[in-house]
Amino acid sequence: MADTGQFDLDAYLGRIGWQGGRRPDPQTLRGVHLAHALSLPFENLDPLSGRAPSLAPGDLMAKMIHGRRGGYCYEHNTLLWLALEALGFRVGGLAARVVLGAPTPWSRPRTHMMLRVEVPGEPQPYLADVGFGAAGALLIPLPLVTGTESAGGGRRHRLMPLACEQPPDMLELQMYDGRTRDWVGQYAFTLEPFAAPDYEMFNWYIATGPRSPFNRRPYLQRTTAGRHIALDGDLLTQTLADGTVTEHRLADAAEARRVIAEEFGVAVPEGLTLLRRLSGG
């Protein structure tokens, strides 16, 4: 990834609380990935403000590290890409169609960003993704090997071939749902490489497109030890490690600002009107 001069590895690792090793090995990859996932929230407040967030390293540092904000998949995974390259890993970009909640694997465009990470001395690369805004998101990287199950952070994932004719090498990331005792598809992808200009286009479309859900209502996610919380419009959902789910409807914009600050650690930008956004209007 080009233009890395404004990225500060020490500041990034301090923000996510990583005090472990810095060698490009599996332990560092897992540790940094998990620390990022548990420290930086998923949030779409910039698209709600009517602008596409910048993916430039300096702007990501200013917003997510020094400004203590979150972001969505392009911001999170671009930041992780910069960090992993600085640590000595070889990183490439991937893109997926989100199948979670979709009627078919082809219902949505391929716009979700993930990473392919090579570890020196390891025979297989890993799938890394700290920007999937869902309770079934990866917490630790997953070996890019079909049929291999991986567990970490209380979650189980696997990669399986997706039954389709075109393309024949489509993979599906699946998460095990303990409540239904079934594997649930999260997103589908190939190993075709994607580069920064592709994500710039995806980012602009998702942030500003008239059909995008991310510029219609607040959407925030945060995973901590033992629970996952999500705000979708005016609905706040908490999922505990044992599968217990509780829901709460926010009363107004004042409560929304308080919840976003206290539960997600994010200060709502000045001038952003949440009241009319709560129901998706």
Image: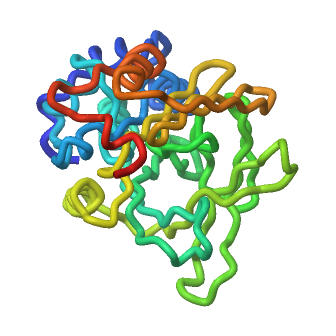
- Please determine whether, in this image, residue 256 is positioned above or below residue 109: above
Where does the image place residue 236, in percent across and percent down from the top left?
A: 55, 32
Front-lying residue, 261 or 279: 279
Residue appearing at x 48%, y 66% in the figure:
97
Residue appearing at x 17%, y 48% in the figure:
50
Residue appearing at x 20%, y 43% in the figure:
53
Location of residue 10 by image quarter:
top left
Location of residue 41 by image quarter:
top left
Where does the image place residue 233, in percent across and percent down from the top left?
A: 44, 41
Residue appearing at x 25%, y 55% in the figure:
203
Location of residue 54 by image quarter:
top left
Front-lying residue, 97 or 160: 97
Q: Is residue 81 visible?
A: no
Where does the image place residue 124, in percent across and percent down from the top left?
A: 58, 52
- Please determine whether, in this image, residue 240 is positioned above or below residue 142: above
- Please determine whether, in this image, residue 105 is positioned above or below residue 248: below
